[in-house]
Image (cartoon, grey):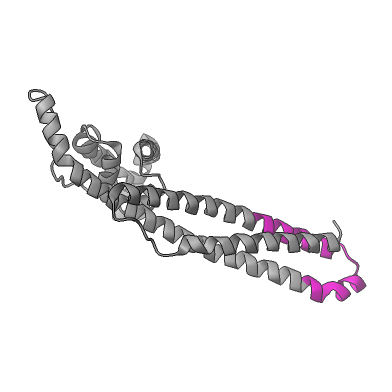
Amino acid sequence: MSLQFAKARITKTRTSVENIIDSTKVLLEPLQTPETGQEATISLERRLTFVRQRLRRLNLAKRNLEEATEKLEAAFKELDGDTQRKEEESFNEYGGGATDEIIRIEELVGDLAEMEILVLEELQNRRNQEEQTEQPSRQLQRRSEQPQTGYPPLPNLQIPSFSGKTWEWENFWQLFRHNIHDQPISNIAKFNYLLKAVSGEIKETMTRFQISETGYEEAITWLQSRFGREEVIVEQLYAKLETST
């Protein structure tokens, strides 16, 4: 690839990146949701979708710009010494400009990730409010329809926290499954209980799953595959014993 072609590619890619960055700023504006529950939930879910789509687009733009920069460097290295000296200033200008754009993308990705967490937290709060509002009517309906066989209302349970220690997983899961997972409540409510139970890096990972019926199932499947394997439990138990001696 010639140096001129590599420069043209840098220019084209930077223009595309700048357009993406400019159109992303609106997604970082403070959350303003309608007061009514359903409208607020729809608004938050729409914002979450846009944020996640833009994160993917920015990461793709970053890769494209990095590839264009690599092509520029490769083309410059192919030049002879005299030509390199003539093109050095221009090369540094194009390369430096591309690096600045990559830094801007990384900063914007960080801001969007924070916004994603804010939206997820607000969605969780809305879901909790909806559950609290709907729970009394659901309990009455359940009692009237199934007076003999209906399940008792779910109490305010104290669930042991789980921070990612594999040897604590089995005990945590047995309690969580009995008290929450097997109860006749929606997966969204179960997800809310799960988010309250986990902490640290595990909580951050759980917030990446969509707060929905299927999102809860995907989160549980991930936890079981990550912490439920016997060989991993044994390995970490040995490590724990070695550090305690």
Residue 199 can be seen in this image: yes
Compared with residue 99, is residue 20 higher up or lower down, i.e. above or below? above
Q: Can residue 209 be found in the magenta stretch? A: no
Magenta extent: 63-91
Q: Can residue 69 be found in the magenta stretch? A: yes
Q: Say which quarter of the image contains residue 148.
A: top left
Q: Position of residue 32 (x, y in %)?
A: 37, 60
Q: Residue at x 92, y 73 (%)?
A: 82
In the image, 138 versus 244, the foreground residue is: 138
Q: Position of residue 15 (x, y in %)?
A: 69, 63
Viewed as shown, does residue 47 lie left or right of 136?
right
Viewed as shown, does residue 91 lie left or right of 16?
right
Q: Say which quarter of the image contains residue 168.
A: top left
Compared with residue 231, is residue 35 higher up or lower down, i.e. above or below? below
In the image, 230 versus 213, the foreground residue is: 213
Q: Residue at x 14, y 46 (%)?
A: 156
